[in-house]
Image (cartoon, grey):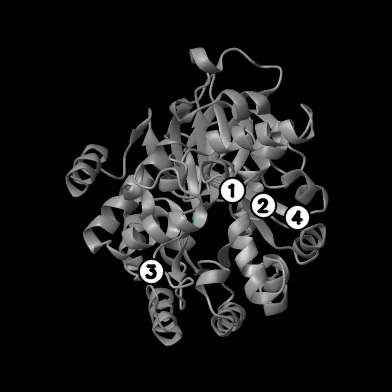
Amino acid sequence: MILKNGTIVTMNPDFEVLEGDIRIDGDSIQNLGKLNPDPGEDVIDLEGKVVLPGLIQAHVHLCQTIFRNMAEDRPLLPWLQEKIWPLEAGLTEDTTRISAELAIAELLKGGTTSVLTMETVRNTEVVLDAVRRSGIRAVVGKALMDRENRGHPNGLKESINDAITDIEELLATWSGSDNGRIGICLAPRFALSVSPEFFECIVEFSRQHNLIIHTHASESKDETKVVRQETGMGNIEYFHKLGLLGEKLCVAHCIWVSDREIELLADSSSHVLHCPTANLKLGSGIAPIIEMLEKGVSGAIGADGAPCNNNLDVFAEMKLAGLLQKVRKGADALPARDILAMATISGAKALGQEDRIGSIEIGKKADLTILDLDKPHSMPGNDDLYSRIVYSARPDNVDSVWIGGKLVVNGGRLLTLDEQDIINRAKHATK
Ligand SMILES: [Zn+2]
């Protein structure tokens, strides 16, 4: 199979942009350049289209999508205590399935091919089954919570033993399945939901099984204050003391971090997951992304959950990431290419899969997001293709999406799930 005549934004180490062709063999990119089709080989013409590495969102909550527009106008802790935890506690297998499918439909149609997720405490296998059927690439984490939060019962607390038993079952059934498309991570919710003993157990389990630890930290001022009251230190310093920091740590937000904590994140090769819309929607603040990237922190991007955003749109996240740093540091801050890197190669690094995804290179998986930018809102703009993608593209520019050599969106239409059926079931479930 050859995809011909595209403008290929490789995001390879030299940031090459090629005019040419991509040969897909099985689930991988077999060749790049000016290619002649073999006799009988399928050819798809991409004349005038832009080919990106499949876009990566390194922080989402698929199971929360059915709570979209149901948890408005609250800061983080009341948002969790009054809305999100009771709603998650009320999820059934059926509503979890609808939520995950709704999320994945939006993600795939919007050009996101890979996600790192944090789900709820129960029904993780239902989410994984939706991932399997949909074709999306995902590293999925069951939320880990062995504490209630300062007298707020959350209906989600479980014992360390029960949680570990559940994770072992998920690992045995799902880890590495579908040729590595599906993975499992450890997802301690945040410092206030997890005891120090459980964190220590999570660190040990991560080392034994080579698993990503996917968590939240230093999102709101109030949360960071409570962590300091309980531990006597900043959230990242606390994680450092617990042994959590390292290349396996993916930590969302990191808004209220000290210079010392930024250094700790950089020195340990931890990954920060930037969620700009959610950070504004909950009134949390603006993460010092420029400072973190300058210190060498690896920064990826994600929409977080539908109830704090209220979309799962990677283009909106990229644009806002740029705008927020420009208002902080000036109009030349955070070039568009660096932002696209957060949603591609840096996202791949967060998922521990930079040898497989995140750029268009021979031997990598054929995960591709193909854009048609010839629309009124994204015309013209050949001077700076990166800015055109980051600041003018939207999900409706997504023409087709390939994941592991499989076409999952074609002509803007989702091929792997029944979109109308999902919408009908979501409507019925939330009546
Ligand atoms: Zn989150």
**Residue 423 position within the rendered picture, expressed as x and y whole percent measured from the top left:** 24, 40
Q: Which residue is mark 4?
A: 297
Residue 255 marker: 2
Instruction: Identify the mark nearer the N-term, 1 or 3.
Output: 3
The local secondary structure at tag 3 comes to loop
Residue 399 marker: none
Say which quarter of the image contains residue 378.
top right
Q: Nearer the viewer, residue 175 or 346?
A: 346
| Circles 2, 1 touching at the beta carbon (< 8 Å) | yes
Label 2 to label 1, Cα distance in Å? 8 Å
96 over 107 or under it: above or below = below
The kind of residue tagged 2 is Ile
Q: Nearer the viewer, residue 288 or 398?
A: 288
Label 4 to label 3, Cα distance in Å? 33 Å
| Mark 1 residue CB less than 8 A from any atom of ligand 1 | no
Q: Is residue 281 left or right of residue 103?
A: right
**Residue 218 position within the rendered picture, expressed as x and y whole percent measured from the top left:** 64, 59
The kind of residue tagged 4 is Val
Instruction: Identify the mark nearer the N-term, 2 or 1.
Output: 2
Instruction: Identify the mark nearer the N-term, 4 or 3.
Output: 3
Q: Nearer the viewer, residue 283 or 262?
A: 283
Residue 154 marker: 3
Q: Which residue is mark 1?
A: 284
Label 1 to label 3, Cα distance in Å? 21 Å
**For discs 4 and 2, the disc positioned in front in the rendered view:** 2
Please name the residue shown 62% across and 31% down the image.
Answer: 8
Instruction: Identify the mark nearer the N-term, 1 or 4.
Output: 1
Label 1 to label 4, Cα distance in Å? 21 Å
